[in-house]
Image (spheres, rainbow, N blue to C red):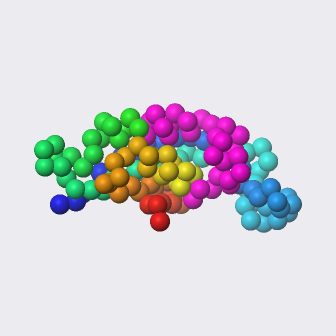
Amino acid sequence: MKATVCRKEHFNAAHRLFNPKWGFAKNQEAFGLCNNPNFHGHNYDLVVKVTGEINKETGYVVDTKYLKKIIHDKVIERFDHKNLNLDLPEFADLNPTAENIAVVIWHILRCEINYDLELSVVLYETERNFIEYNGY
Ligand code: NI
């Protein structure tokens, strides 16, 4: 009997979307306002979903205290109030789009969660735009 445990968190961060191989005009065409050289911010909502068998002894799929702790320690502490382009080495050569941020967060959390459990990360960049990444 499988179930999915979801934990919602929040962080604020700044970024600039651009491809350093392109000139300003092409970047402007592709990324518009998100290409602002002086950066801009988003209020990100992060939903982490862990799916697996309900443990017969605990009744849990995963301990939400543990899930909360690893999201805080490994993701929120590192991402919140940061400039993703400048402060996080993961984005030194990777455009910090919502897609790439979701992939980076997935990889960080994947190392911390039992491999018997499936992991999915949903990242909301705005209320209406969100990305889901589950490792495929
Ligand atoms: Ni943006």
x and y percentages locating residue 59 in the rendered image = 16, 46
x and y percentages locating residue 132 in the rendered image = 47, 61
Residue at image location 86% in from the left, 60% down from the top:
23
Looking at the image, can residue 117 be seen? yes
x and y percentages locating residue 111 in the rendered image = 44, 46
Please say whether residue 94 is one of the residues in the magenta stretch.
Answer: yes
Give the answer, above or below, for where 116 lies relative to 67: below
89 or 31: nearer the eye? 89
99 or 56: nearer the eye? 56
Residue at image location 43% in from the left, 49% down from the top:
110
Please say whether residue 93 is one of the residues in the magenta stretch.
Answer: yes
Residue at image location 24% in from the left, 49% down from the top:
61
In the image, 7: left or right of 33?
Answer: left
In the image, 43: left or right of 54?
Answer: right
Residue at image location 60% in from the left, 46% down from the top:
42
Query: Which segment is the magenta one?
Result: 71-100
* Residue 64: quarter of image: top left
